[in-house]
Image (cartoon, grey):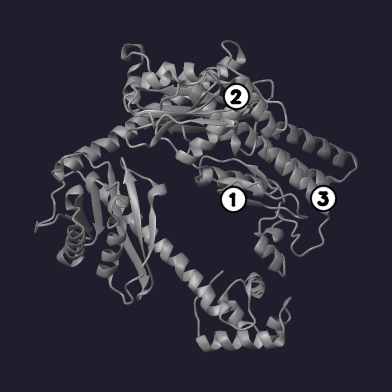
Amino acid sequence: MQLQSRTRHQALSLHDRLSMVSNEPGVYLMKDAGGKVIYVGKARNLKKRLGSYFKTTDQLNIKTGVLVKKISTFETILTGTEKEALILEATLIKRYRPRYNVILKDDKRYPSLRLYVNTPFPNLSVVRKIKKDGAMYFGPYSSSQAVRQTLKVIHKTFKLRKCKTRDFKGRARPCLNHQIGSCLAPCCLDVDKNRYKEIVKEVILFLKGRTPGLILKIKKEMMAAAEQQEYERAAVLRDKMLALEKTLEKQIAVSNDFKDRDVLALAGTPDFSLITLLIIRGGFLLGSRHFTFSETLSTDAEVIGTFVRQYYEHAPLVPGEILAAVPPEDALLLEDWLKSEREEKVKLFWPKKGEKARLLQIAFQNAENELESYIASVNAQMDILVRLQEKLKMDNIPECIECFDSSSLSGKEAVAGMVVFEKGKPNRSLYRKYRIRTVAAQDDYAYLAEVLKRRYGQGEKSRPFPDILLIDGGKGQLNMAVSVINSLKIEENFKIVSIAKKDEKKKETQDKIYEPGRANPVNLGRKKDLLLFLERIRDESHRFAVSFHRKRRIMTYKRSVLDSIPGVGKKRRATLLGHFGSIKKIRAARLEELCALPGMNRKVGKAVKNALVSKGETGTQN
């Protein structure tokens, strides 16, 4: 690949630089006046594609015309083939995360079901990150509630073990699930591995949406059992079949060819775009997901193409067909790439009539409804921010709000957390954790001073600043924050306010908002939504700081109690915690029990007993 840098031709206009661009395939990077990459694209012919952006303003649509004005310069990277450009574009989007590209949010926040089949007795676990570890993944699901509902059906219908792997290894007797007949108890009993493997296969069929086929399979087994006069087994199979039929009744049949396919519909306005994904397995609609994007320089074909590349790169299952309202850009290249991901042929369709077009229409209606709801939500949130601007007498709308809180236990493992809300919603990628470095004793004021200096005291590296700095506390914490910000000489960059909890002794009915130099709280009006919004930010910062403190305390707890004992390393610590489950149970165990564990001996067992008893630890750590 060959890099053609245009940044050194500052004296040339964009049109002059365009004349120097090659006609070869490659990737282009659009940059703003500050040199930041704001858009990455690919093209079969770089000169032709870039030329489409720099037409006269009246030849461009309004949105593209506004965004193109922000382009100060560009770079191009030549590639040998279009496929190389496709791969390079995806890599550069991940690296730069440009503002005007279609970028899917990380799927770690969506739950999936994991089934590791390379063990004698697999079980299902809920995870939020899909790895290439040889396990089978199903999902992602739209919510934790959807996962719980799926697990409920599986646990009720199939005798798959429910215990976690840790519990499975250390269990001494069957649990209640075995007693009520919903688990074979492979943790304790001699269970036929082939029989359990058949249960796993049935669960896989169910999770893949093959419920009709699974019902037919169970029905044949039931009839065979009845013919052999195995009436108890036939009754069990009958109950399983009826349970699955009841589940199937709740699913919506949308096609009669019983194929697996995903349907993509795109709806948008000049400010927002939304893709709705319908997941169809075996002709039944299993669910839908919605993906929203703000400003983008991409055409509809580019949006669909980029979405396909990003979504199916980590998807646990790529169906044999993908339907889209418009032909994705470079459809043949995408099909070739999807085939390598799925290891089977994948076809992209953009039908105009027939059954598949009807599925697209269903997806489009869902996309339009979701977009309306999303825009209404955004407008309501912006209304809150506009009214907050008025109440706080600010010059601009407070689109970015940062809030700090600290947490410690009598001064031990003191930490602080910063949360960031952008346009009324949390932006977790900008959250920050701080371990207190300079304060030894319990002192919330000193904690606040330290983290504010670390956040805002690095000159240009501290930018961008928020519109509002929200402090959890009363006038004391507010004055401390003002003092620190003034010492850094950046007080003109943002508004500082604090939120204090109501004093029930004074019969106060709500929390109070304070501004610097003002004795009385800010009057936010009769509507409670402004106060509730700020309380939500405060509570989120408290949750974030406390959760970080708990993690630090757990790490310290493990280290101080077990790792400080001579002879106890990672393996022995894992053995002790894996068998007993907690420090409290290890302390209560007899010396003979400790010595009997794999890798333990009497000398180390005595050291563990003496250390735990002498330190008098009382907490429980699983």
Determine if residue 336 is in view: yes
Residue at position x 33%, y 76% in the image: 440
Disc 2 designates what residue? 82
Q: Disc 3 vs disc 2: which is toward the camera? A: 2
Distance CA(mark 1)–CA(mark 3): 24 Å
For label 1, count other residues whose C-alpha is less than 10 Å away and answer few (under 14), some (14-19) or many (20+): some
The image position of residue 359, as x and y in percent, is 57, 20
Residue type indicated by callout 3: Arg
Q: Disc 2 vs disc 1: which is toward the camera? A: 2
Q: Disc 1 vs disc 3: which is toward the camera? A: 1
Q: Assign a secondary structure to mark 2.
A: helix
Q: Quadrant of residue 596?
A: bottom right
278 vs 41, nearest the viewer: 41
Q: Quadrant of residue 527?
A: top left
Residue at position x 75%, y 41% in the image: 238
Could you tell which of marks 1 and 3 lies nearer the N-terminus? 1
Disc 3 designates what residue? 195
- Of the 4 image quadrants, the one containing the N terminus is top right
Distance CA(mark 2)–CA(mark 1): 39 Å
- Say if mark 1 contacts mark 3, CB within 8 Å: no
Q: Assign a secondary structure to mark 3.
A: helix
Residue at position x 72%, y 84% in the image: 601
**Image-based side of 52 in relation to 323, left or right:** left
Q: Quadrant of residue 584?
A: bottom right
- Say if mark 2 contacts mark 1, CB within 8 Å: no
**Image-based side of 498 in relation to 139, left or right:** left
Label annotation for residue 274: none
Disc 1 designates what residue? 126
- Of the 4 image quadrants, the one containing the C terminus is bottom right
Residue type indicated by callout 1: Val
The image position of residue 280, as x and y in percent, is 61, 28
